[in-house]
Amino acid sequence: MELELISGRFPAKDAEQILTDIFQVKIDYHQRKIHMQYLSEENIQHAEKRIVALQDTLRSILKRIRESGKEMVDIHAHVELSLAAPLTQ
């Protein structure tokens, strides 16, 4: 199942805010995972690396928008959802 989240043209400042908010949700998700007591050290390290990667990507996107000098930015975002079988142990 594919869900369209965003499809439109936005003023650059609004586009920056939308993208920042989207990335922040994912960063917050990984930060919450780090604070879970049952999480292994390996999973914590993975979450920490993912946070850094997300922050780097966001910085790069925002820099690109600002350096483009464009007043408007097109954003098209979708989510693809697949229901997976349960993990077996």
Image: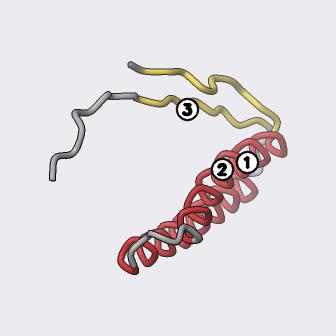
Q: Is residue 82 above or below residue 68?
A: above
Residue at figure coordinates x 63%, y 33% from the top left: 75
Residue at left offset 48%, top offset 69%: 47
Amino acid type of the residue that numbered disc 2 sits on in the rendered structure: Val
Provide residue 69's location: percent of width, then percent of height.
77, 50
Say whether marks 2 and 1 touch (CB < 8 Å): yes
Asked which secondary structure carries label 2, the reply is helix
Alpha-carbon distance for marks 2 and 1?
6 Å
Determine the CA span between mark 2 and mark 3.
15 Å
Dot in front, 3 or 1: 1
Q: Answer with mark 2 or mark 3, whichever residue precedes in sequence.
A: 2
Of badges 2 and 1, nearer the viewer stands: 2
Residue type at tag 1: Asp
Label 1 Cα crowd, 10 Å radius (few <14 / some 14-19 / many 20+): few
Identify the secondary structure beneath mark 1.
helix
Residue 19 lies, with reference to residue 43, above or below; the image says: above
Picture coordinates of residue 2, whole percent (x, y)? 42, 21
Instruction: Indicate which label's residue lies in the foreground, 2 or 3.
Output: 2
Q: Quadrant of residue 63?
A: bottom right
Q: Residue furthest left?
A: 89
Of label 3 and label 1, which has the lower sequence position? Answer: 1
- Residue 18 lies, in percent from the top left, at 74, 42
| Colour basis | secondary structure
**Residue 87 percent across, percent down from the top left:** 21, 45
Which quadrant is the N terminus positioned in? top left
Q: CA distance from mark 3 to mark 1?
A: 13 Å
- The residue tagged 3 is 77
Judging by the rendered image, the residue that carries numbered circle 1 is 21
Task: Say what amino acid the circle numbered 3 marks.
Answer: Ala
The numbered dot on residue 25 is 2
Q: Does residue 86 appear left or right of residue 37 in this picture?
A: left
The residue at the point 61 percent across, 60 percent down is 27
